[in-house]
Image (tube, grey):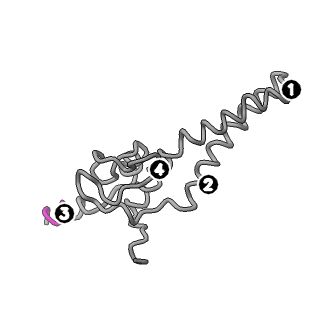
Amino acid sequence: MSMDKENQKDSVKRPWPAIWRGAKCKCPNCGKGWLFHHYLEQHDNCAVCGEPLAYYKAGLFLPFVVVTFVIHLVAGVMLHMELSGASNPLYYLYILVPMTLVGTMAILPSSKGAIIGLMWSKGWSDEQDR
């Protein structure tokens, strides 16, 4: 009976480690192989463990996650600027626009990796469509 429990425990994919590995842009299965081979271009299989990754697409969930984080960041800075008296519109242009662009580009790979890790752990894939 203990062997059945161990095999059952090994077959369960825990979401938080997979999300963390994905956020580090690593394979959600082994945590060693790279998830992307360009900025956001996903590998078909992990180079280390061979786990198929092509079926896990972040799709339309990725923009919602990124926009949620960036909007909260920009809104906080905008509120601080407004309350501190920096009311010149050029301050907003020179500070908030670059911060929005850089913030978005900085969190895109980690967000996509985390979403792929979540999808991998839950078994949500496009595999049945192929």
Mark 4 residue type: Leu
84 above or below 127?
A: above
Q: Name the amino acid type tagged 2.
A: Phe
Q: What kind of residue is marked 3?
A: Asn
4 vs 1, front mark? 4
Residue at 58 percent across and 61 percent down: it is: 60
| Residue 120 drawn at (x, y percent) | 38, 60
| First to last magenta residue range | 2-6
Report, in whole angstroms, how far the alpha carbon at label 1 lies from the one at label 3: 62 Å
Q: Earlier in the sequence, mark 2 or mark 3?
A: 3
Q: Are marks 4 and 3 in contact (CB under 8 Å)?
A: no
Q: Position of residue 127 (x, y in %)?
A: 38, 73
Label placed on residue 109: none
Residue pointed to by mark 2: 64
| Circle 1 residue | 87
Q: Mark 2 or 1 closer to N-term? A: 2
Question: Residue 88's x, y, as percent?
Answer: 86, 25
The residue at 64%/48% (across/down) is 67
- The residue identified by callout 4 is 40
